Structures are given as structure tokens and as C-alpha cells.
Image: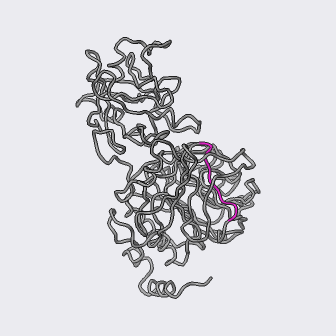
């Protein structure tokens, strides 16, 4: 492989000084603060380590210090127009304000995730495969809001049925060639479905046999493999097996991990491979497995085909869920020192899911919603019930438990079905939203059903009683969020359901936006 002179020079310098010490000292990591663009990105670090990126995907930031192109493309529902979302500055963070403006008064989906490596390995809507029909769903562009380096950004929220793919790639490892992969996931958003993957897969969208994939898997599926505890785990999807180590099923050295922002790494070469992981907000990587290929037939040598998948299995199995923020694939087997430097760059980027303000209905604000109905309920707040997924009101005070206070705290988000309206994300259950189903309110993750975004979107109005605010259902505009017998519904002022009673309807549908309890 040809290496530019500057890479050879850097490598000689590192060897002379000791590569691990140099990397740990930050020679190949950013020196920027979390409020600034990085001077180097992960792919600059991989290149200096002799294992350059051949695919680099992110909806949140540039992965090269000089990258100034588009990160992803969105399409709005109102007129099917598309727009590329780029960075605020070279090597910087996503221009989320451009998305907010473009999608105002409507909803948007993410259609393309651009490859920053220059090899054209963009990810687009996945087609049908051997396990499921297609094309797959596209991700709601507003469902995974975060901040990175203090800047607003959006991740890629994969509900069951959502998937992205590229079957015609350039430079991706095939056969038994060596490669490395990393991704940043939401470690709290997962399920046991098959398969939330990012990485190398079949080019014909069918299961073509053992060893024809090498992708990072994240979830708690125990059918093909597992680690210690109850999951979720970082594992490798090598086709017909989710591997946590050398054994086909249980490898206790692979721990359960659930960091809010999780760095997940898999790398593989001739009869060697490894799983590594860590907290993407702080700290170093841990090695969960490092050794020979699995001790069952078909995986040594490997038969990688070089397609790229995100959110699905190699045969388009699409029952999984998860959230993706950034990830790369490399040419060659990265050293631990290089990966450690990449992890330092990731933690310096400043991923955060917290609120950006308190007490207002501005997206990003952390609030509690206080009932206004007197005399029964003025000390009651809208909260989710830990015994089930229902939403209720209950008395919350300074003496309430920390759990009760957290259950009554919400993060205001741009409306999933109309960005000029609002959605309410649970403060202590990230990725779960207030939504109605059969007119009753629940706290749920998006299950892939087509109505979820609308069911989870509410438009604020002046309080129906003249006090505070009322919240109008976007898909049932005569109905507002109401408490009735201490349970939350969407209700109209009169109707066939008990909760549509006209008695105290105006008060029951009016809420004060209060300072958050948690």
C-alpha cells in the first residue's frame, strides 16, 4: 500500500519515541476544548497509525480535521425536498440549525449518511434481503437529539424496520483481509432483535454462510451468543453467529455495558480478532476479547464480502433497535495504541444528552408539568409509572424519592412529526417518549410503527383554562393532554369516552411549565 511521505515520517517518529507513549501523550489526538472543532479527527489518527479509514460516517461531526463536506441528507415530508446537512466549520460539528430551519412545520427523515473518507461509501436506504422485505424505513431526523462540544446535533435513531446499506463499496476489506471498525452507540437503546449492526456484510443481501460478515453488534440477543450478565453486549456479527469471544455461545469475558454513549470496537485479521469498548464520554478502552477466530468451522479464514450495513443484519434482518452517532471502517488491523488515541479524541468531542436549559418549552429544556386543577391536583405532576409504561399524575414534593422526581421530569424536544410542535422525552429513560395509544398516554420507545412520531407530537397552545399551556395532539387536533382520575389521556371537550367528560376539562388540560424536579 502506498503511504504518503508525511505518514511514513510520523510513523518513524512514533517508533523512535515509542508509539504507545506518544499516542497517550496526545501526539495524534485533539488538543481542542469541547467547545471547539477538533484539530484532528479519528480518521487522521487511524491514518497516522497506518490503518486509514475507508468509510467514515457521522451525523454529528467531521471525522477528519479538515473535512468540510456534507454529513448526511434529510428529506422533508411536506414536499419531499432534500437538503444536505454539513458542518459549522472544517473539522467541526454538524450544522443542526440548518436541519431545524429546513424541517420547520413538518417532519424529516435521514436519507443518506455520507462517507467522509472520499471513497464514496455512502449509506442509503437498505433494500429487501433474504430475511425481510424492503426497502427498509428511514430514520426520523429528530428522534435522537444530543449535544456535541456544546453544539446541537442529531444521531440516527434506528427503530425496528429501519436500515441503511451500501452493496457497491470501494476499499472495504474482503476475504480474510484485515480491518478495524468503531461506532458510538446509545448504550441504553437496544433490544434482543436481530441485528443492530454496523460494519462488513454480504453484497447480495442474503446469508451466504459462516464468516461472510464482520460487523459490530450491540444488543442483548442471546440466541447466537452472549457475555456475562444480562446484556447488552458488544459482539461481532460474523454471520450465523454473534460472537463474544472464541466460543460459539457464552464468553464470560465480554461484560454487559450500558454507557449512555458507548464506544464499540471490533477488528479482525487472519486468525485474530478483538472486541474493545468504553465510555464515549470519559475514560479509556477495555479489551473484552483478543485472540484467535471462533472455534467452529467457517470462520478461519474469513470470507468477508465488503458491503456496509447499519441497523440491520447481513440478510436484512431488521427487528433490532439502537442509536448510532458516528463510526468508521479501516484498511488494516489497527493497533491498540491507535485505538486508544481514537478513544481520547472521542471523549474530548464532548457527547452529552442532557438538557441545555430549564423551565421553558424551548427544545432542549428540562421541565416538569404541573397540574392546575383545584382543589385536587395542584401539587401533582405528569410522570411515568415505574410499575408499567402508563403515564399518570401524582404528588411530587421536595421529600419525594429521587426516582419519583426523575419520573416527573421531561426534556422538551422538537416535535417528531412536526418540528414546530413538541415531543417530551423522559429525563431518566433516554430515547423514550410520551405518546398516546388508544387515547391513553404511555412512555415508549419507537417500535417502528408508522404512527409513533405523530402519537408522540403535541402542539402547545395557551391553556384552555386561561392558565399555563395546553398540549394539542398533532394527529387528533380536538384532543389535548388531560389527567382524568389521575391517569393521563388525550381528550376532547365532550365525547363518547369517560375521559372526554366536560366537567373540569379546561383545567384538566391546562398545565404549568415548572422547574424540573430532577
Closer to the camera in the image, 191 or 269:
191
Q: Which quadrant is the C terminus positioned in? A: top left
Closer to the camera in the image, 420 or 392:
420
Up the image or down, 330 lies above or below 432; here it is below
Q: Is residue 439 magenta?
A: no
- Tell me residue 28's x, y (percent): 42, 75
- Tell me residue 12's x, y (percent): 48, 87
Q: Is residue 165 magenta?
A: yes
The magenta stretch spans which residues? 160-168
Q: Main secondary structure of the magenta part?
A: loop
Q: Residue at x 37, y 16 (%)?
A: 505
Q: Single out the residue that lies furthest toward the left.
A: 398
> Can residue 145 be spotted in the picture?
yes
- Tell me residue 496's x, y (percent): 50, 12
Q: Quadrant of residue 147?
A: bottom left
> Can residue 294 be spotted in the picture?
no
- Tell me residue 502's x, y (percent): 39, 12
Amino acid at each position: 500500500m502506498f503511504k504518503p511521505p508525511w505518514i511514513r515520517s510520523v510513523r518513524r517518529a512514533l517508533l523512535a519515541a515509542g508509539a504507545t507513549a506518544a499516542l497517550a501523550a496526545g501526539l495524534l489526538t485533539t488538543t481542542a476544548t469541547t467547545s471547539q472543532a477538533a484539530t484532528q479527527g479519528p480518521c487522521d489518527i487511524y491514518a497516522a497509525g497506518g490503518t486509514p479509514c475507508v468509510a467514515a460516517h457521522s451525523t454529528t461531526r467531521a471525522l477528519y480535521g479538515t473535512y468540510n463536506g456534507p454529513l448526511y441528507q434529510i428529506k422533508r415530508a411536506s414536499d419531499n425536498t432534500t437538503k444536505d446537512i454539513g458542518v459549522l466549520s472544517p473539522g467541526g460539528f454538524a450544522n443542526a440549525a440548518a436541519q431545524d430551519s429546513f424541517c420547520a412545520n413538518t417532519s424529516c427523515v435521514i436519507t443518506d449518511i455520507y462517507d467522509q473518507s472520499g471513497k464514496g461509501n455512502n449509506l442509503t436506504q437498505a433494500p429487501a434481503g433474504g430475511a425481510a422485505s424492503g426497502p427498509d424505513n428511514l430514520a426520523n431526523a429528530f428522534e435522537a437529539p444530543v449535544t456535541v462540544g456544546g453544539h446541537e446535533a442529531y444521531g440516527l435513531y434506528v427503530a425496528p424496520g429501519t436500515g441503511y446499506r451500501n452493496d457497491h463499496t470501494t476499499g472495504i476489506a474482503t476475504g480474510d483481509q484485515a480491518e478495524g471498525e468503531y461506532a458510538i452507540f446509545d448504550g441504553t437503546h437496544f433490544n434482543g432483535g436481530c441485528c443492530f449492526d454496523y460494519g462488513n456484510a454480504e453484497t447480495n443481501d442474503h446469508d451466504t454462510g459462516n464468516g461472510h460478515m464482520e460487523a459490530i453488534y450491540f444488543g442483548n440477543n442471546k440466541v447466537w451468543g452472549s457475555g456475562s450478565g444480562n446484556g447488552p453486549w458488544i459482539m461481532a456479527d460474523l454471520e450465523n453467529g454473534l460472537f463474544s469471544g472464541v466460543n460459539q455461545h457464552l464468553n464470560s469475558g465480554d461484560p454487559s455495558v450500558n454507557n449512555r454513549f458507548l464506544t464499540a470496537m471490533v477488528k479482525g485479521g487472519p486468525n485474530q480478532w478483538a472486541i474493545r469498548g468504553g465510555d464515549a464520554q470519559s475514560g479509556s478502552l477495555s479489551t473484552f476479547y483478543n485472540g484467535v477466530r471462533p472455534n467452529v468451522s467457517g470462520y478461519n479464514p474469513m470470507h468477508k464480502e465488503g458491503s456496509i450495513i447499519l441497523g440491520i443484519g447481513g440478510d436484512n434482518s431488521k427487528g433490532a433497535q439502537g442509536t448510532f452517532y458516528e463510526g468508521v471502517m479501516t484498511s488494516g488491523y489497527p493497533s491498540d495504541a491507535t485505538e486508544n488515541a481514537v478513544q481520547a479524541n472521542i471523549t474530548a468531542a464532548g457527547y452529552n444528552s442532557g438538557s441545555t436549559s430549564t423551565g421553558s418549552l424551548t427544545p432542549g429544556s428540562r421541565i416538569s408539568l404541573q397540574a392546575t386543577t383545584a382543589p385536587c391536583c395542584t401539587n401533582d405532576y405528569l410522570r411515568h409509572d415505574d410499575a408499567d409504561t402508563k403515564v399518570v399524575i401524582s404528588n411530587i414534593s421536595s421529600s419525594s424519592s429521587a426516582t419519583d422526581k426523575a419520573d416527573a421530569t421531561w426534556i422538551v424536544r422538537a416535535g417528531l412529526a412536526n418540528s414546530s410542535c413538541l415531543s417530551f422525552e423522559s429525563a431518566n429513560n433516554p430515547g423514550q417518549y410520551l405518546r398516546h395509544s388508544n387515547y391513553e398516554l404511555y412512555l415508549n420507545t419507537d417500535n417502528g410503527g408508522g404512527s409513533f412520531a405523530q402519537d408522540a407530537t403535541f402542539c402547545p397552545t395557551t391553556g384552555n383554562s386561561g392558565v399555563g399551556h395546553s398540549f394539542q395532539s398533532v394527529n387528533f387536533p380536538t384532543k389535548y393532554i388531560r389527567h382524568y382520575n389521575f391517569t393521563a389521556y388525550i381528550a376532547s371537550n365532550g365525547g363518547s369516552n369517560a375521559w372526554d367528560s366536560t366537567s373540569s376539562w379546561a383545567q384538566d388540560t391546562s398545565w404549568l411549565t415548572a422547574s424540573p424536579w430532577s
